[in-house]
Image (cartoon, helix red, strand yellow):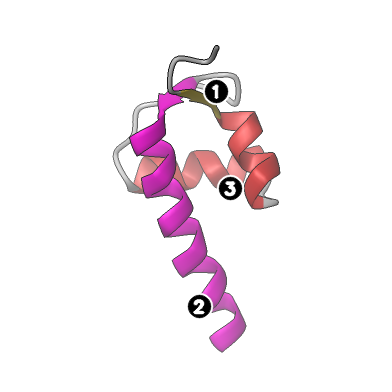
Amino acid sequence: MNNGKVRIYELSKELNLDNKELLAICDQLNIAVKSHSSTISESEAERIRTAAEKIGSNEWNT
């Protein structure tokens, strides 16, 4: 069981983003990660999903 932990690279696959893009989002949200293999909590992953969705919708609107 993953105990509510999510790996950055798994989340990047889910969101169809590069690891680098996802790490940049983490930085903007002040979520401390070191690399694509870092783990984050499910609540942090949800914050990233929300931010990525907003970024994605902004790209389509420009």
User: Tag 2: Cα neighbours inside 10 Å, few (<14), some, or many (≥20)?
Assistant: few
Q: Which mark is residue 61?
A: none
Considering every residue shown, the one lying at the far bottom of the view is: 62
Q: Nearer the viewer, residue 52 or 30?
A: 52
Q: Quadrant of the N terminus?
A: top right
Magenta stretch: give its range.
39-62
Q: Quadrant of the C terminus?
A: bottom right
The amino acid sitting under disc 3 is Glu
Q: CA distance from mark 2 to mark 1?
A: 26 Å
Q: Are marks 1 and 3 in contact (CB under 8 Å)?
A: no
Secondary structure beneath label 3: helix
Please name the residue shown 55% across and 43% down the image.
Answer: 22
- Residue 56, how many percent across, how many down? 56, 69
Considering every residue shown, the one lying at the far left of the view is: 30
Q: Which mark is residue 58?
A: 2
Q: Earlier in the sequence, mark 1 or mark 3?
A: 3
Report if residue 62 is visible in the image. Answer: no
The residue pinned by badge 3 equals 21
Q: Are marks 2 and 3 in contact (CB under 8 Å)?
A: no
Q: Nearer the viewer, residue 20 or 44?
A: 44
Please name the residue shown 50% across and 77% down the image.
Answer: 58
The residue pinned by badge 1 equals 35
Q: Earlier in the sequence, mark 2 or mark 1?
A: 1
